[in-house]
Image (cartoon, rainbow, N blue to C red):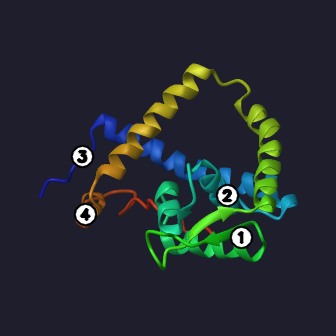
Amino acid sequence: MKRAERTPEGDALSDLVLDLFRLDGLLLTAGDRLVAPLGLTSARWQVLGAIVSAERPQPVAWLARDLGGNRQNVQRIINDLHREGLVSFEVNPHHRRAQLVVLTENGQRAFEAAMELQVPWINDLSEGLSVKDIRIVHRVITALRDKLEGSREDKLRVPADRDHRFQAIVITRSRAS
């Protein structure tokens, strides 16, 4: 049986994915350090950001979808944020059991403080990179995300008889809050 071979594009994308995995870990670690003085983690900061970005209060499942995570992980983080008074729950008129998540004043202050810390950090990180290059990378990442979000789950599975560096692409992040 002939082994499947990657195209040059597949090879380049595989290298990019490996670097994105490494970058993801580094960004989460840096984010954890950045917001630790506020009592936050990268995961909590991301969830607060999803709540802020939503046009209106949303249930946990919708926030999880927006984050590209799974509902159970986001629910756990939301529960932690609720215990700390950073979010509250409202009745969802469209679904009795799926409460809406709302940012409290303390949650809004925590998010704004995190964003204030982020400004000098992101400016330093972007030093030496051109806006043009950043926008190109953003377009590539957006195109990949759109392809993955448009794919059915079974299209993402890699046949076991193929020699790949990774047997599956993990889309959801199960990083601890």
The image shows residue 108 at horizontal and vertical percentages of 76, 55
- Disc marking residue 5: 3
Find out whether the residues at labels 4 and 1 contact each other: C-beta distance under 8 Å. Answer: no
The quarter of the displayed image where residue 146 is located: top left
Residue at the image position 36 percent from the left and 51 percent from the top: 149
As measured in the structure, the alpha-carbon distance from the residue carrying label 3 to the one carrying label 4 is 21 Å
Q: What kind of residue is marked 1?
A: Leu
Q: Earlier in the sequence, mark 3 or mark 4?
A: 3
Find out whether the residues at labels 2 and 1 contact each other: C-beta distance under 8 Å. Answer: yes
The quarter of the displayed image where residue 144 is located: top left
Find out whether the residues at labels 1 and 3 contact each other: C-beta distance under 8 Å. Answer: no
Q: How many marks?
A: 4
Q: Nearer the viewer, mark 4 or mark 1?
A: 1
The image shows residue 82 at horizontal and vertical percentages of 71, 73
Q: Nearer the viewer, mark 3 or mark 4?
A: 4
Q: Nearer the viewer, residue 37 or 61?
A: 61
The residue labelled by disc 2 is 48
The residue labelled by disc 1 is 81
Q: Nearer the viewer, residue 55 or 80?
A: 55
- Disc marking residue 154: 4
Find out whether the residues at labels 2 and 3 contact each other: C-beta distance under 8 Å. Answer: no
140 up-or-down from 59: above or below:
above
Q: Secondary structure at mark 1?
A: helix
Q: Residues within 10 Å of mark 1 (few under 14, many from 20)?
A: many
40 up-or-down from 7: above or below:
below
Residue 66 seen in the figure:
yes
Residue at the image position 25 percent from the left and 60 percent from the top: 162
Q: Nearer the viewer, mark 1 or mark 3?
A: 1
